[in-house]
Amino acid sequence: MKNSEFLKLSALELVEGYKKGDFTVSDVIETALEHIEVNERNLNALITPLYEEARSRSWMLDAALARGEELGSLFGVPVVVKDNITVDGVRTTCGSRMLENWISPYSAHVVECLERAGAVIIGKANMDEFAMGSSTEFSAFGPALNPWDLSRVPGGSSGGSAASVAAGYAPIALGSDTGGSIRQPAAFCGVYGLKPTYGLVSRFGLIAFASSLDQIGPFARSLKDVAAILQVISEPDARDATCARKERPNYAEFLNVTSLEGFKVGYLAGYESLEIDDEIKRAISQTIEICKEAGAEIVEVDLPISTRYGLPCYYTIAPAEASSNLARFDGVQYGFSVAADDLKELYLKCRGSGFGPEVKRRILIGTFVLGSSRYDAYYLQAQKVRQLIIREFNAAFSKADVLLTPATPTLPFKRGEKLTDPVKAYMADLFTIPVNLAGLPALSMRASMSQSGLPVGVQLIGKKFGEGDILKAASVIEQVVGPAATALGGDRK
């Protein structure tokens, strides 16, 4: 096998190759690192490539392989981790000057799980600063680009993670999703992106944006890899009080189904009249037909509150929590700091220079809605709407096992297209935000390719801890449309 072929193999195919002795971990990791070195000057998907650390770990794993030790489920698999997830001894910037040189003294729970399974962390992914953005243009380290078309954005805030998987840097990556930050870039880059149920995956070691909404999840190019990495990272963790203690199922058992008999797929009533691209509407119609031909019953569901009030509800609650969470970055304890004559000047200089424009905007919004004279009118009202959204989803799931919606209203947009209009940029998360408000699991996946050669994504939403139902429906769809492709060589525009 040519080394370049390693870049197109799935995580599970790599593990199988190691077992058969077809290649070594060093072969795969060195190929991935060389590929990164060549492509990063254009793609900017990584903030911190981990060349030496990855090589050192690959040698250690090859030695374990030679000794005949038992292989973990992700043995020797290259993984990219979003740069708001800590790795012991590695800088974690959150895409911000505020943490530009901060070295984490510990690893996140999900990173510990990956390393126990034998994975190799090869880089920290570029992201919108503190996970605030929908295009990765708000990174202090420059924008990441879409591997399918370098003039377009990869989505955000986990754009670097999605771009890394689409570009063949690694078969899997980790991101975080607060309002669509896994699913929207996955749709833009044509890969799988799963936002698990809130509480399924530990948030220990994830630098918080909005604590009641944040959730770590995987990117991959095959559904089997999604199930494999979810199995690894969903291990219960006592260090996160919100992490569910319940037993996790074997997610691989939900794959390779050929029939959806007795299964109900709900689709959003009136989606055809919404302001979304025609090619996305066609992808929804085609996906409905795939499910119908597999034996699923197709039902119509109404989500008027989520569709109309999800965005304003989210952009009240999330900035409020961000305002509180980011108060710790003051130039006193760690991170960005400057000389100042007094404490007030220190705060003003550090927070003024350390934070970028989108983070400042959301801190100001959050501080405003939490003001004593405005708390009831804005924040409390948004929390009441959130409860209505939860009830609305519960009603929808009394009729359907999974819901099918667009992942995004548009195809990947051009760089700079929405920088001057934040409200237009926020609309990119129209279909993903209500899922976070309700704490539900959802997967975005490529349903087709547009006439211009860009991926077209759809979203499958499940009940709480209903990841299995999502994987089942997605497995049937994948058998028709195929797994995600890499944007390599002639595949890319």
Image (tube, rainbow, N blue to C red):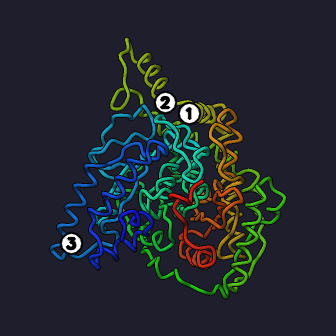
Which labelled disc corresponds to residue 386? none
Task: Name the kind of residue labelled 3 in the image.
Answer: Leu
Q: Is residue 267 above or below residue 54?
A: below
Q: Can you give x and y, in whole percent of width and height, for residue 280 in the image?
A: 73, 61
The N terminus - image quarter: bottom left
Q: Earlier in the sequence, mark 3 or mark 2?
A: 3
- Residue at the location (31% across, 52% down)? 107
Judging by the rendered image, the residue that carries numbered circle 3 is: 65
Q: Earlier in the sequence, mark 1 or mark 2?
A: 2
Q: Nearer the viewer, mark 3 or mark 2?
A: 3
Q: Is residue 229 above or below residue 384?
A: below
Judging by the rendered image, the residue that carries numbered circle 2 is: 355
Q: Is residue 269 left or right of residue 453?
A: right
Secondary structure at badge 3 equals: helix
Q: Quarter of the image holding residue 203?
A: bottom left
Q: Can you give x and y, in whole percent of width and height, for residue 8 in the image?
A: 45, 66
Residue 52 vs residue 290, the one in the foreground:
52
Q: Is residue 194 above or below residue 288?
A: above
Q: Earlier in the sequence, mark 1 or mark 3?
A: 3
Q: Can you give x and y, in whole percent of width and height, for residue 113 in the image?
A: 33, 63
Q: Can you give x and y, in whole percent of width and height, for residue 441 in the image?
A: 56, 65
Secondary structure at badge 1 equals: helix
Task: Name the kind of residue labelled 1 in the image.
Answer: Ile
Outermost residue, left direction?
Answer: 67
| Number of numbered discs visible in the structure rendering | 3
Mark 1 touches mark 2? (CB < 8 Å): yes
Observer able to see residue 105 = yes
Q: Is residue 72 left or right of residue 169?
A: left
